[in-house]
Structures are given as structure tokens and as C-alpha cells.
RNA sequence: GGCCCUGUCGUCCAGCGGUCUAGGACAUAGCCCUCUCAAGGCUAAGACACGGGUUCGAGUCCCGUCAGGGUCACCA
């Protein structure tokens, strides 16, 4: 699977703390993590906080929490430390300065004293092929450049891209990519505030941190030559590049929060399981060798292969994601699901604690999101208000029982169930099973009555269902009755009978 | 607009020159199961963007066209 002779694989995820943790970022993180782990290498987190204007307090912590939620553990990072720290670019400023000086000395970069205003004007005037900086400061005599810098004149440092030729690099997924130098801008490497831009920071840090495989989103492809040029200028080895396809909105544009939720934590709040998030992201742009679609994080990590990565941008399909989430909910043991519902805040107040597992057991088959739980089981905690008319079974809006028949059905049911023994008692083996308050017996009794009165079970049980659950759609009736208990059920039937009397 | 990437059912994937009258999954429709809703089972409809090559043979290789996306910041 991997080449043992090659140096240890080191990958990284390098988020910019400028907002909510992005699902697309988690996608790239997942691949970086999986590849590092399956190769026995290391996965590093580096914070690229070089844009002070977009910095968001707490964003770094939230990103780390998201990674943790998905189980993508890292070996080195701002929180765990490591031999290549610091892991926040804002704490590495002297390093960039030092490296940029090397570039200037070697003629690979130059100071630019142009004002933002001039730059803007140049950009607006530009047409056709070359739309970038006009390289005015590139020809400044070194002495003058040094003198003005020493005098404190604000400036940036730009990459001196060769005027001719081209740079080629190998993308692990697409093969050789060649870009003409004439289409590459003299990128700013060091901003006037002393912070590096992405391009300088990423190259210096990836090298210093020993990153062997740069796995990032497709949007970086066209700026990769700048990075390659920098590696060459420093005399360093160029890492392997893998550009993952961009996840798309339904309209196929790059995934954006205006058109699709992108905050990972939003998915958590919406009742998605981390297992499902990892699984879903793992099937975007990648397939398992045996075509299986439901798999764990560990399975993905073991089976992930560049050979099975697709280069076309997948649309984020909420429908399929929800289906998968449902699959995962059903796969979770009841105890685990119960614990999740509680720890994630989806447990409604007032649910009988001793019946928790039984209730979850009934709901597990019918949820696609954890959020559906509380509404669906609310009737276990309290009697919910409902219209009397709901008791009357109907077909396409046409009642199939009269109000009187409905009341009779309810009364006979109540009568039959009142004859049941009180709560089922494991000790009381003397009673015959049929008289115990248990689902099977309750159902048998109900069916017998339906048969006697000449109703189809489905129609006959509607009044009962509404009486017990206050809803037309509910968890399985008889199991529900067993959980609710004899006294509560009889009381609810009484209430329903009273309510039915108000019907015409 | 220049440059770069991409192009198999509505969507996600399979297909890595012949076994493709193109397979699976989600979604959709119908049926079955059924105390409701789900879950589950079965069936149906549904795609190789187009045009040239290469080849005995192309969804698979090459070129072009078209389409979609990305990128052209002192943001990442």
C-alpha cells in the first residue's frame, strides 16, 4: 500500500481562523488525516492567521473542536505542540522575514513601494492576458530599494516570477500541469504589516514542518507554480501535490454558505452524527474498493486510495446525507443512541428515565436526524392537545366511522384493556400471559375486538392511536402502550372518550 | 475575457479497449409487508455532452467544439 523506503509521510490541514469551521475544510482534513494515518505518518494542524482584518476570535478553537468531533486526531498543532512549532503563523513572523530576505538577496523577490491606490488603478486599467501587477518596482535599483526600506517607507515584498518560460508540476490526481509564467503575477509574499501572505507562509512552513504531501482543494491549482518557484528559489524539495475536487452547491458553484449550510457545527446541531459526516464526506470524490457506501472512519482510513479519488466536483446532496445519517442512527446500539441524544441536547424534559431505552428503541428505526426525536416522543412525557376530530378515522378526508362508532370503539377498547392486570410483574408468574400489560397481548386483544366489531385493524386502531399518542402518526401503538403503562393508557382513553362526545 | 481543472442516470459513485443490450446507492414512481409513520423487500423509469480521429473493436486513448467550475487581492 505504501512505500516503506520513502520518508515518513507528513500531511497537514491549515485552516484560517476567519469564521465557522467549513465542511469543505473537514473534507480536505479527512483525506489528509486518512492518508497520514494509513501511511503511519503524522497529521499536523497549522493555523494560518496572517490576515488580521479577517481574524475571528474563537474560530481556531471551534475548528479544533470540529476536528475532534469527527475523530480526526492530530499529532502536532497549536494545542498539542510539537517539534516544529509554533503552529500559528502569527507567532512565526521572524521566520518569514528571514526567508524573504534570502529571496531578495538571491534576486527572487523584490520590495514594492506601490500604494494600494496605485495598485487598484493599475488593475482597473489592465485588460487582456496580463491583469496583475505591472512590476513597476521590480526594476528599482537594489540600493534605492534598500535605502527606502531603511528609511521606513511602507512596502511589500513580491515574488519575481520569471518573465518567460513555464513551471510544471505533478498533481497526484491529474498528472502534469503546466502554467506559463506570463500568466503568473508577481505575488505579494510579505505584506506591509510584516505578515506573510498565504503563498510565502505555506511554502516556508510546509518545508520547515516537513510536510511531504500537500493535499488541498482544487482552487489552489493555479497558484501552485508560485509555490514551486519558491521551493526552487530556496533550494528545497517540492512536495507531492494532490488537489481534491471542490464540493459544489446544487447549482455546481463552489460550496458556499449562501446556498448550502457549510458550518460543520450546524450539522451537529441539526442532529447529524459524526460517523455520518465522515462517511458522507468519504464518499464524495472517492469510492471504496468493494463499492460499499456505509463505512466507518477507520475503514475509510484503511481503504483510502488516490487511485479511487475522482477529480470531478461532487454536489453536496443533503438528501443522500440524511439517508446516510439514518443508516448510522440505526446502526448505533440503543444505549449509545440514548447517550448521544442526551449529550447532544436532543432529550426532551419529562421523559421517564426508566423507559428511556425502550423509547429510543422504538424511535431508532424512524429517525434520519436526532432532531426528530423530541417531537416524536413528546407524548410520552405529557398528554398533548389534539382536536377531537382527529379520533375519527378517515380515508382521503372522508370519515369512515361515525362519531358514535368512534366512541363505541374507544369504549369497548377501554373496557377490554381495563380487564388487564396492572403493571406486568416478572415475579407474578401466576397470571396468564394474555392478561399481562404487554404489547403482544394488547395487540391480540385489540385485534379480536376489531374483528368482532367488523373493522379493519388499521382503521379500528386509529382512535386508539390518537387517544394514546395524541397523534395520527406515532411509534408502534402496542409497544407504546406497554411503555406508557396501564393506568396512563386507561386515563388517556377516558379523556378521548370524553372528547369524542363533543363530536356531532 | 486570459489561464487552469472537469464532463457516465436528477445526485453520489462503479467502469481503468472487447465480459456495457453501461452496474450500485440516494431521490422519484408502483407493488409487497403492515396498527400509523418509518424500516425492509421487489419492480420501473433514468446517463456515457457533441464531432472528429486512433483501433479489428472506444464510455474507456488522442484532438476539437460546447458546457460547468476554479482562478486572476497587501484573503486564504
Image (cartoon, coloured by chain):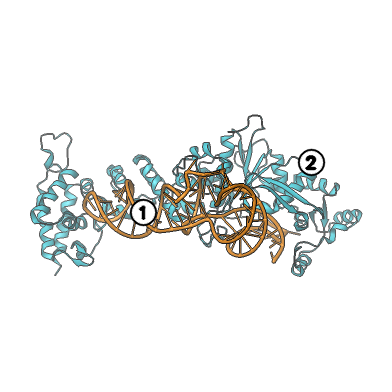
Asked whether, in this view, residue A287 is left or right of residue A429, the answer is right
Asked whether, in this view, residue A354 is left or right of residue A345, the answer is left
- Chain drawn orange in the picture: B
The image shows residue B62, relative to residue A438, as above or below, that is below
Q: Chain of mark 2?
A: A
Q: Position of residue A464 (x, y in %)?
A: 18, 55
Q: Residue furthest left?
A: A452
Give the mark toward the camera: 1 or 2: 2
Quarter of the figure with the N terminus of chain A: top right
Q: Residue A235 — which label?
A: 2
Distance between the alpha carbons at the discs numbered 1 and 2: 57 Å
Residue in the image at 66% along x and 32% along y: A6
In terms of secondary structure, where does tag 1 sit? helix
Figure quadrant of residue A403: bottom left
Neighbours of disc 1 within 10 Å: few (<14), some (14-19), many (20+)? some
Figure quadrant of residue A497: bottom left
The image shows residue A176, relative to residue B30, as above or below, that is above
Determine which residue is flagged by label 1: A372
Q: Position of residue A188 (x, y in %)?
A: 76, 55
Amino acid at each position: 500500500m505504501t512505500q516503506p523506503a520513502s520518508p515518513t509521510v507528513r500531511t497537514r490541514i491549515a485552516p484560517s481562523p476567519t469564521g465557522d469551521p467549513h465542511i469543505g475544510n473537514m473534507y480536505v482534513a479527512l483525506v489528509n488525516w486518512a492518508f497520514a494515518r494509513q501511511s503511519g505518518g503524522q497529521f499536523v494542524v497549522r493555523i494560518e492567521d496572517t490576515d488580521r482584518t479577517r481574524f475571528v476570535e474563537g474560530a481556531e478553537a471551534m475548528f479544533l473542536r470540529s476536528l475532534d468531533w469527527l475523530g480526526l486526531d492530530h499529532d502536532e498543532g497549536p494545542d498539542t505542540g510539537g517539534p516544529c512549532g509554533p503552529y500559528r503563523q502569527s507567532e512565526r513572523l521572524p521566520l518569514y522575514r528571514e526567508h524573504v530576505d534570502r529571496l531578495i538577496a538571491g534576486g527572487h523577490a523584490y520590495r514594492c513601494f506601490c500604494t494600494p491606490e496605485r495598485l487598484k488603478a493599475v488593475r482597473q486599467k489592465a485588460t487582456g492576458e496580463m491583469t496583475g501587477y505591472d512590476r513597476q518596482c521590480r526594476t528599482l535599483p537594489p540600493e534605492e530599494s534598500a535605502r527606502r526600506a531603511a528609511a521606513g517607507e511602507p512596502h511589500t515584498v513580491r515574488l519575481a516570477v520569471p518573465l518567460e518560460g513555464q513551471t510544471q508540476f505533478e498533481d497526484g490526481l491529474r498528472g502534469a500541469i503546466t502554467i506559463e509564467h506570463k500568466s503568473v503575477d508577481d505575488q505579494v509574499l510579505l505584506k506591509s504589516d510584516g505578515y506573510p501572505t498565504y503563498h510565502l507562509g505555506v511554502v516556508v512552513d510546509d518545508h520547515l514542518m516537513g510536510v511531504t504531501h500537500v493535499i488541498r482543494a482544487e482552487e489552489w491549482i493555479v497558484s501552485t507554480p508560485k509555490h514551486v518557484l519558491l521551493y526552487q528559489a530556496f533550494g528545497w524539495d517540492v512536495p507531492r501535490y494532490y488537489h481534491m475536487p471542490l464540493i459544489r452547491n446544487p447549482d455546481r458553484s463552489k460550496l458556499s454558505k449562501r446556498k448550502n449550510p457549510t458550518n460543520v457545527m450546524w450539522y451537529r446541531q441539526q442532529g447529524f452524527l459524526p460517523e455520518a459526516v465522515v462517511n458522507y464526506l468519504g464518499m464524495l470524490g472517492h469510492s471504496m474498493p468493494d463499492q460499499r457506501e456505509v463505512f466507518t472512519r477507520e475503514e475509510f482510513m484503511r481503504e483510502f486510495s488516490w487511485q479511487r479519488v475522482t477529480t470531478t466536483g461532487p454536489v453536496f446532496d443533503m438528501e443522500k446525507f440524511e439517508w446516510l445519517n439514518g443508516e448510522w442512527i440505526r446502526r448505533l446500539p440503543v444505549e449509545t443512541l440514548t447517550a448521544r441524544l442526551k449529550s447532544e441536547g436532543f432529550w426532551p424534559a419529562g421523559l421517564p428515565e426508566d423507559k428511556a431505552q425502550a423509547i429510543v428503541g422504538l424511535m431508532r428505526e424512524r429517525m434520519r436526524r436526532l432532531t426528530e426525536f423530541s417531537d416524536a416522543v413528546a407524548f410520552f412525557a405529557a398528554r398533548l392537545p389534539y382536536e377531537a376530530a382527529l379520533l375519527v378515522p378517515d380515508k382521503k378526508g372522508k370519515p369512515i366511522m361515525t362519531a358514535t362508532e368512534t366512541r363505541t370503539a374507544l369504549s369497548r377498547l377501554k373496557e377490554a384493556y381495563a380487564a388487564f392486570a396492572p403493571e406486568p410483574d416478572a415475579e407474578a408468574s401466576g397470571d396468564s400471559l394474555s392478561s399481562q400489560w404487554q404489547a403482544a397481548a394488547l395487540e391480540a386483544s385489540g385485534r379480536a375486538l376489531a374483528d368482532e366489531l367488523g373493522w379493519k385493524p388499521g382503521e379500528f386502531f386509529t382512535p386508539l392511536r390518537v387517544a394514546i399518542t395524541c397523534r395520527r402518526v406515532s411509534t408502534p401503538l402496542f409497544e407504546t402502550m406497554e411503555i406508557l403503562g396501564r393506568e396512563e393508557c386507561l386515563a388517556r382513553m377516558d379523556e378521548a372518550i370524553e372528547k369524542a362526545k363533543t363530536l356531532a
